Image (cartoon, rainbow, N blue to C red):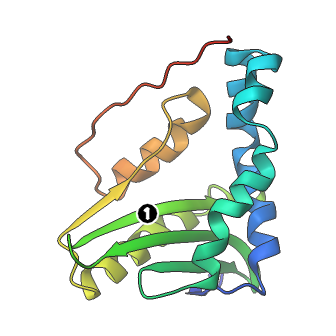
Amino acid sequence: MKEMNIIPADMEVFPVCTGIAVRAWQKGYDEYRGILGEGLFENIFPGWEQAKADSMEPYFKGNLEKHAYIVLFEGKIAGFITCDIDFKRKVGTICNNAVDPDYQGKGLGSMMYDFILGVFMMEGMTAATVATMDEDAYIPAQKAYEKAGFNKKLKRLTYYMKL
């Protein structure tokens, strides 16, 4: 059996995780570029790779409400998951998370979601949320969230136009 483990993350592993994020989200951003066209895409998502890293950094620095964990597969970082814990509302939110494309299909996503839902329950959360996009590139994420037990969804549309 392959060795898999999830442990807390910190800034030491942050660069590896941002690399995983960029590789995992590349297909989605390529799809956005095709939908929006090059000009509008660059206007809406300039330097998306750095923006993704910037959005992840507070979780790797950590505090009472923001957490990051890494997934180890045979001793190598194969994925990560970040979350918000809202103690007032008792809602846990799965934030940025990804499995390195080289490690997908090995059950690591399911393991991450089971783990983080357990964290939420231990912290006294009574609800959990996760958001993803509706484009084709995100169908695997949608299926993984449904497999983890997320069974209620609200759709949100974002419209764009070039001025």
The disc labelled 1 sits on which kind of residue? Ile
- The residue sitting at 78% across, 87% down in the picture is 12
Image quadrant where residue 125 sits? bottom left
Image quadrant where residue 3 sits? bottom right
Seen from the viewer's position, the closer of residues 10 and 161 is 161
Quadrant occupied by the C terminus:
top right
Element on which disc 1 rests: strand
- The residue sitting at 67% across, 16% down in the picture is 35
- Quick check: can you spot residue 100? no
In this picture, residue 113 sits left or right of residue 118: right
Quickly name the residue at label 1: 94
Residue 145 in percent (x, y) is at 40, 52
Quadrant occupied by the N terminus:
bottom right
- The residue sitting at 76% across, 82% down in the picture is 13
Residue 150 in percent (x, y) is at 29, 52
- The residue sitting at 43% across, 63% down in the picture is 94
